[in-house]
Image (spheres, rainbow, N blue to C red):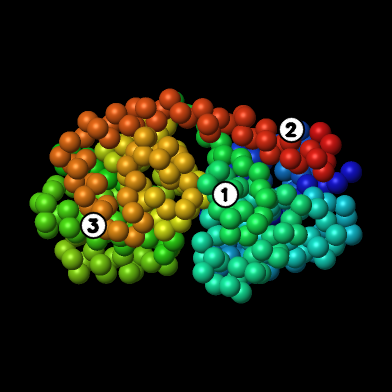
Amino acid sequence: MRDLIIFIPSIEGGGVEKNLFYITKYIQSKFKNIYLITANNLNQNLFGKNIKLIMPNTNYFNNKSRFVKSIICVYLLIKNFKKKNILILSLQSNFFSIIFSKVINAKIIIRLNTSPEKYISNIYKKILFKILYNLADEIIVNSYDFKKNLYKNFYLNSKVILNPIKINKTRKKIDFFKNFKGLKIISIGRLTNQKNQIILLKALYLLKNKFRAKFKLYLIGRGYNYNFLQNYIFQNKLQKNIKLAGYKKNASDYIKSSDLLILPSNYEGLPNTLIEAQVACVPIISSNCPTGPKEILMNGRLGELFRPGDHKDLCKKIYNYYKNRKFLRKKSILAKKHLYRFDYKNNLNKYALIISKYIKY
């Protein structure tokens, strides 16, 4: 009997973590001997009694880099499972988990959640990526565009499991700019180069100074670009228009009270924030980046797409919505009819079926 090891060194509160909680909750009634390895010190109650946590007995590593956390988790793998028959389900830091799996001759399923654009332009990284990921027994990706991208650039085959979404009809509505009558914009994501929030800020600078639009942006997220974005806001006198709100545990509760959600990323996997906005029937403007947004928005039928990195194009799309909201609102209403693609039980059962190839129900 193989033990199932879920490998996720850093639990940070984003889309990957939301999928983690969905997956663990679903599969723990179907398989025995499930362990979760992380460098975060967590409460067992988060996962239920059937998931055994393997983690440091200290909070010291909670805020360390993902690299450090990955090293710690490899150590925990070696310490606890070196001589055992295991299947690793790796949701993060796949380079580390793949190498370890081959050292001890374990089976491994990896899930990729972000399109590997950063490896494509560097020939050495591209070769390394292709060699290592080819060693995985199964590769799961979260969009069909992602699957095509992976095969086109790395000749790697993969299986698609879309992000599962649980539609919560009792979700709270948190109004972030009370009594404001202008355009209320929300954007959610880590403050990193990948998420490219500076493009959104530049677009809003144009919107304010060229088109004299009345708007406020509530930007949820934390990351290494915080000071960079804050400086841009102050230098361009956008303090009254833009609030860097930091991390919010219940970020999706803020979407309902917004008029518009914007995703400015350079690359994605299948961004949950767009699906959450569709659940809340909130209009969307997203970069047409690889991969996910075009698929979620059905090539523009369910929301607006702008050229990645083009703040002028983004500004134009926002201004068009500012002047006439009917067109994009119709798209957001239509989007609700296509949420069946992200059905909770259907997509989670696909994980169980793949795992069951290596571990019996």
Looking at the rendered structure, the secondary structure element under dot 1 is: helix
Q: Residue at x 72, y 36 (%)?
A: 352
Q: Position of residue 317 (x, y in %)?
A: 24, 46
Looking at the rendered structure, the secondary structure element under dot 3 is: helix
Q: CA distance from mark 3 to mark 1?
A: 29 Å
Q: Is residue 68 left or right of residue 34?
A: left
Q: Nearer the viewer, mark 3 or mark 1?
A: 1
Residue 29's disc is 2
Q: Nearer the viewer, mark 1 or mark 2?
A: 1
On the question of residue 335 being in view, the answer is yes
Q: Position of residue 276 (x, y in %)?
A: 43, 38
* For residue 80, above or below residue 179: below
Q: Residues within 10 Å of mark 3 (few under 14, many from 20)?
A: some
Most foreground residue, 359 or 309: 309
* For residue 71, above or below residue 251: below
Residue on which the image places disc 3: 312
Which of the two labelled residues, at mark 3 and mark 1, occupies the earlier sequence position? Answer: 1
Q: Is residue 307 left or right of residue 207?
A: right
Q: Amino acid at mark 3?
A: Lys
Q: Position of residue 167 (x, y in %)?
A: 48, 29
Q: Amino acid at mark 2?
A: Ser
Q: Residue at x 16, y 63 (%)?
A: 237
Q: Residue at x 82, y 47 (%)?
A: 3
Q: Position of residue 82 (x, y in %)?
A: 85, 61
Q: CA distance from mark 3 to mark 2?
A: 50 Å
Marks 3 and 2 in Cβ contact (< 8 Å): no
Residue on which the image places disc 1: 148
